[in-house]
Amino acid sequence: MRGLWLGCLAIALHAQASEPALLNNRQVIETCQRAIQLMESTSVALPELARAGAPLVENARQLLTNLRTNTANADLNYSFVTNLHGYLALSDALPRPFPFSEEAQKQLHELRDILARVESHFHALIALKDQQLRNPDRDNLARYTDLNSRAGPPKPGKPRVIFLGDSITDFWRLNEYFPERDFINRGVSGQIAGQMLGRMESDVIRLQPAAIVVLAGTNDIARGIPLPIIEDNLAMIADLADYYKIRIILASVLPVSDYHQDSDPNYERTPARPPAAIRALNDWIRRLCATRKLTYLDYYTPMLDASGYLKAELSDDGLHPNSAGYRVMAPLALAAIESATKPVPQPVQTPRKHRLFGN
């Protein structure tokens, strides 16, 4: 009997230890929702708590609204933890009626468990951000060092094009979609526009391309990076390309969807990448291209369904294109590349007619 009890305890401890501290987007929202429900219900059992804790409950509601658009925001997570701490401290300090409801007691215990969970998530989030900041190769320059050294110069009559981007570019097998072309993939999964800017010298300029296709922004939005910062980084990429006489093609951010979340809760994409934020960034990219006479590559519109989301058949996870998605993107990219790299017609100079003296 003792051995069985110890075995059960070991299994329970292992399960607890293996539970990841970092919550996914859906778990953050659901956990915070449950916390607010418990705050509301326990305040009914404690009339004094209903009055004193009302500002904390309202703060929590507002924080949840903001977290829906950016679950990875450390400030929002910290504020939620602080409000939950304050609410539970009030519940401990205020007198309780006798007899105190057993159900309310259970709810307060559950609320403490949630506090421990969101606090653990917050610390894991800070650790992740600290690790990202301390990474000696933040931009992942080492990823393509060897391939770049073996690339060689472009061949005459065969324009070289670099595809610079994140995982959507990284997963794209360009040789299958563009055979016999000098198209080079320099995508790095998880990257933001600022990291791509950091790779411009090593992964683009040194390879002497005729053009560059830039697909960036979806990870910036997911990390809560303000739109003006994303815009500045994309504009600086365009500035560098222009300085080195590289034709630049700026692609729209792809739409996302939640259609596949039943197969995996992590496939709920819209909380971290709100469609409105994607549209706002794409509108800016389109305006930049029009103003500076750059080539705008619109992936967004052909991949959008009638409800405003990424078409279900073009992705298996609501974010990354599947083979059907890349088949939609490939001809669009090729048309943009051919438009950007075609020779600029030179104005025809007609010989001036010289008037004869005296006529």
Image: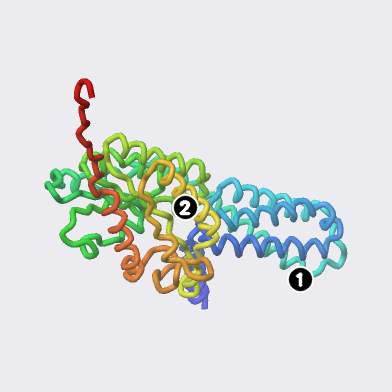
Quick check: 291 above or below 256?
above
Q: Residue at x 22, y 21 (%)?
A: 358
User: Residue 9, image x and y in percent?
Assistant: 51, 69
Q: Can residue 350 be seen?
A: yes
User: Residue 13, image x and y in percent?
Assistant: 50, 65
Single out the residue that lies furthest toward the front: 359
Quickly name the residue at label 2: 282
Left or right placement of residue 55 versus residue 341 in this view: right
Q: CA distance from mark 2 to mark 1?
A: 50 Å
Quick check: 102 above or below 186?
below
Give the numbered dot on residue 103. Answer: 1
User: Residue 220, image x and y in percent?
Assistant: 46, 49
SS state under label 1: helix
Q: Residue at x 86, y 56 (%)?
A: 48
- Residue 327: which quarter of the image? bottom left
SS state under label 2: helix
Residue type of the residue flagged with mark 1: Glu
